[in-house]
Amino acid sequence: MIRSRVFAAAALLALWASVAQGQWGPVPVGAEQAGAATEGKPAIRYERVAGEIVAGTYAGVIGYFVGRGVGTIATTMMKSDHDRVREHIVNDIGIASAAFAIGGTVFAIGNLGAESGDFRTTMVGVTAGVGASLLMSKLIFKGRMPSNEASSHRKWLMATLDSSLPAIGGTIAFNASRKWQR
């Protein structure tokens, strides 16, 4: 059962990656050699894409914990009989903070040099990544962390999915919207 869920998750990721590859369109001939191309899309620089994903992932983790801290402070005045509501608010603020940290980091790295992209499109990709992360978490782990010690590799898989899919989605969306600065 778990293997079929992992396979389904991998198939979804492969489909998402193939769609993203099709979004990157042709590169004008000689654009990089000319130094100041003004037509078409800039060439994909894989080191920049890797930087967007890695930095976006780490920014999202930091943003999540900062957001949870803000949410905790903001909900301290709530009565103790609302602990469940408080935890939902704190978690939602953490997720929103992480999403904006990821989107801002991906956008900032992607806008270095003579290229620019669209922040709204980047945030749509981050949102899609958050949705995919939550969906996979529910499919593979039924929405909760595995509790026994023997499943530590499953915990790392869940943490990796939860933290990296939003950055991957934001990177795909940003690079789909790239253009030369004018």
Image: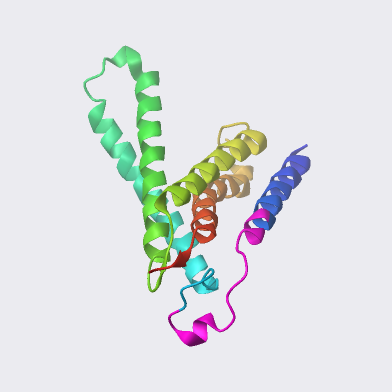
Q: Which residues are magenta?
A: 19-36
Q: Is residue 162 above or below residue 86?
A: below
The residue closer to the viewer here, 82 or 149, is 82
Q: Residue furthest left?
A: 77
Q: Quadrant of residue 149?
A: top right
Residue 30 painted magenta = yes
| x and y percentages locating residue 40 in the rendered image | 54, 69
The residue closer to the viewer here, 164 or 123, is 123
Query: On the rendered image, what quadrant is the N terminus found in?
Result: top right
Measuring 39% from the left and 45% from the top, which residue is drawn there? 98
Measuring 46% from the left and 62% from the top, which residue is drawn there? 52
- Tell whether 162 sits left or right of 68: right
What colour scheme has been applied to the protein in the rendered image? rainbow
| x and y percentages locating residue 22 in the rendered image | 66, 59
User: So how many labels did they put on this image?
Assistant: 0
The residue closer to the viewer here, 102 or 117, is 117
Query: On the rendered image, what quadrant is the C terminus found in?
Result: bottom left
Q: Residue furthest bottom?
A: 33
Measuring 51% from the left and 82% from the top, which residue is drawn there? 32
Q: Is residue 5 above or below residue 42?
A: above
- Tell whether 139 sits left or right of 79: right
| x and y percentages locating residue 77 in the rendered image | 21, 21
- Tell whether 103 sits left or right of 158: left
Residue 25 painted magenta = yes
| x and y percentages locating residue 107 in the rendered image | 40, 58
Measuring 55% from the left and 38% from the top, which residue is drawn there? 131
